[in-house]
Amino acid sequence: MVTESEAVGEPPLTVAAVARRLGIAPATLRTWDRRYGVGPTGHTTGRHRRYAPADVHRLELMQRALLKGASPAEAAGYALRAAAESTRSTRSTRTPARGGDGARLVMPGAARPARGLGRAAMAMDEVSVQRMLAEAIDADGVPAVWDDVIRPVLAAIGGRALYAGDCVEVEHLVTECAMAAMVRATPLVTTPRNPRPVLLGCTPEETHSLPLYVLRAALARRGLGTRMLGCAIPLPALVAAVRRTAPAAVALYAHLPAHADPGALVHLPRTRQRVHLFACGPGWHDVDLPARVEYLDDLTCAVARIESFIT
């Protein structure tokens, strides 16, 4: 299926032009092409291949999935599947949802709970969304619900927003419901197993804090104490928090490479007892981290690694 941009003759773009458009480094684009196959598909004359509009669209889908907390491999897989599904669909599937098939989310291979949550979300049925999340967390735990239910739904909503330009309200509803569900799923840890807490915060430019609330809930359900600083924590405030709490570990979250500043970790003060530093989230994936910082790329890994260091 020819996209609208191709129909009007939008020219293919160089690596540098696509990198500027997405706000990422050219090296990151090349890595995504080499590792995940999300690169230019056409052949052009000369040594340099160029990105057609459809190629750029796949990258936008991948970036949208990364914004929802997917790992680069998961985001690339989603982008490739969603783009293939779009090719098989008619043009009507890209118009705003008004019921029927147009009100569905594209979630190839998603588990039944994710599909159910997606239907409730598209109906803007907040009560059902909250109930489904609570029941799923009680049955399967926080990590499984995050990886198998919430993230696929948010990624699918993001993909639909790029295709059709709608569903922003659905995305906000699911995010707020997921945040509330994670707060409810976080027990009050009055006697934590770790004498020194885990400090959780976002980088100074990062405003997406939902994954941190998921991490806090998972740690608390294992009896581990945390201190939540939330989104966009200024560096001086982060430094002050480290001095005030003398944490056993600091986990700093970033969604996008543009928000992943290693300086925020380098400038953290050293305390008499060692502080373990963790860079969490897809934004850090291709960032050169200081030697004493460990990258955590998924929730299950993050919980296990943090627990192993502080107990």
Image (cartoon, rainbow, N blue to C red):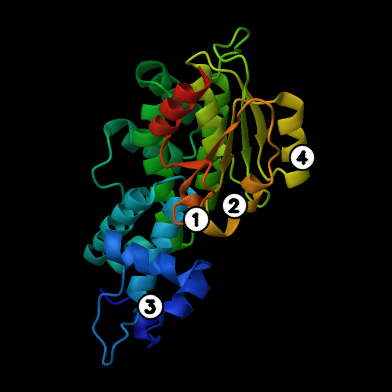
Report if the CB atoms under discs 3 and 4 are less than 8 Å apart.
Answer: no
Q: Nearer the viewer, mark 4 or mark 1?
A: 1
Q: Nearer the viewer, residue 183 or 125?
A: 183
Q: Is residue 91 visible?
A: yes
Question: Residue beneath label 4, please?
Answer: 237
User: Residue 226, percent across and down?
Assistant: 61, 23
- The disc placed on residue 262 is 2
Q: Residues within 10 Å of mark 4 (few under 14, many from 20)?
A: few
CA distance for labels 4 and 1:
24 Å
The Cα atoms of the two marked residues, 3 and 1, are separated by 38 Å
Q: CA distance from mark 3 to mark 2?
A: 40 Å
Marks 3 and 2 close (CB-CB < 8 Å): no
Res 60 label: none
| Rendered location of residue 267, percent (x, y) | 69, 46
Residue 121 location, x and y as percent? 45, 39
User: Is the C-beta separation of discs 3 and 1 under 8 Å?
Assistant: no
SS of the residue under disc 4: helix
Q: Is residue 70 left or right of residue 255?
A: left
Q: Is residue 232 left or right of residue 106?
A: right
Give 307 or 39, whichever is nearer the viewer.
307
Residue contact at pointers 1 and 2, CB within 8 angstroms: yes
Q: Nearer the viewer, residue 25 or 274?
A: 274
* Mark 3, residue position: 4
Mark earlier in primary sequence (4, 2) = 4
Asked if one can make out residue 203 in the rendered structure from this viewpoint, the answer is no
Q: Is residue 114 left or right of residue 286?
A: left
Q: In the rendered image, which quarter contains the N terminus?
A: bottom left
Mark 3 or mark 1: name the one nearer the start of the chain.
3
